[in-house]
Each structure stands twice: as C-alpha cells, then as structure tokens.
Image (cartoon, rainbow, N blue to C red):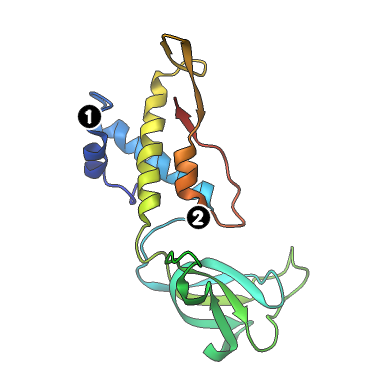
Amino acid sequence: MAVYVTLADFKTWLRNELGTTDDAMLQLGLDAAEVAVNEHCGRNFNAASTASARLFRPESLRLVTIDDCTTVTSVVENGATVAASGYQLEPLNGRRPSGLDVPFDRIRRIYGDWYMDGADEVGRATISVTATWGWAATPPPVIEATKILAKDIISQRDTRNGVAAFGEFGSLRVRLNPYVEQLLAPFVKSTATTFDFVGVF
C-alpha cells in the first residue's frame, strides 16, 4: 500500500537497525505509518494523475474547501458551469508565504455567491469540481516522517506495558515523537483531527 516510501528505500534508510525483521513486517509498518500520517494531516499526499469530477458543499457564500489538486479543469455550480473568471484558486499561486509549493485546496467565488442548498451543516453538495487531484510530488518532510514513524511502529513490538527497555537509570518509557510532529506541522489541514505520535527515548 505505502506509496510515499518504497520497501527498498526504507531498508536502505534503516541500515539494518531493526535486525532480522522480515520484509512483510517492514511493509506493514510502512503501511501503518502512511495511514497515520494521512489521518494526522487530514489529507493524503499521492501524486496527481488523471482528472476526475468530485462533489463539494460550500461552507460559506464565498468559499468552498476542496481536496488537494494541481489543476482545475471546470467548476459546475448547481448544474451551471462557472466561468474561470468567476472563481479564484487558493492558496494563491499554489504557494505558502514561506515559499512552500502546495496544491490548491480552496475555491473562492469572485462574482456573486456560491449556491447553498439548506443550512451549512446539512446542505446538499452543489459544487462539482473536475480537477487533477493530488500533489505534484510527495513533500520530502512527509517522506521522512513516514520513515521515522514506520520505524517507531515496528519497534513497538519490543515494548511491554509502555516500557521500551531498562537502562542504567531505570525503564525507558514511550513518549511523543516531536520530530514527526514538527515535520508534518506545515501539512496539517485546518479541518484535520490531529493525534499524538508515539516514539521511544
């Protein structure tokens, strides 16, 4: 399943630090890490391929949040095509203020308002967007976070009751992994429900 990191690349990165762990276990760790990264960020980082149509519901009269995409072919509002001059893709230029290249994930109405059918919470999806969904390429911080988290997940097989090992100063307990969280922080979607990553010190 994992597409951010291949098994071969992961094994090279590990430098045999997990000993004789078999390929099947390594692949499961990668798969689990990728799912956790996606859930934490509220998005996936698959590379964009072919265009297709998806439905969305405006959250306000001027803004509709969409899935990550690199290009938008058409926007249809309640059955009527919206001219390209009538909407604006954001973030502008597909870039963050920091200079990070990112996909478009919002469409702002320029002239008029989005058609909203019913209350915001229960309204019908009235916007159809045909786009190339995904990222131009998986961001390097996401790739590295996936590797680190996969190694942490596989290493958990050696923990018992939260204790990873015993050292000179007693037991070493699991804790949050600040490196993974820091790497992924710029990619967390505002609507995502984040959760803590587990690491070992």
Q: Secondary structure at mark 1?
A: loop
Q: Is residue 74 above or below residue 133?
A: below
Q: Secondary structure at mark 2?
A: helix
Residue that label 1 marks = 16
Q: Is residue 184 above or below residue 150?
A: below
**Residue nearest the observer in this picture, 56 or 13:** 13
What amino acid is found at the position of numbered circle 2 in the picture? Pro
Residue 6 as seen in the image, left or right of residue 62: left
Image coordinates for residue 63, horizontal then vertical, percent: 65, 74
Q: Quadrant of residue 51 in the image?
A: bottom left
The circle drawn on residue 174 is none
The answer to whether marks 2 and 1 mark residues whose Cβ atoms lie closer than 8 Å is no
Quote the CA–CA distance across marks 2 and 1: 30 Å
What amino acid is found at the position of numbered circle 1 in the picture? Asn
Residue that label 2 marks = 186
Q: Residue at x 38, y 57 (%)?
A: 139
Image coordinates for residue 149, horizontal then vertical, percent: 41, 38
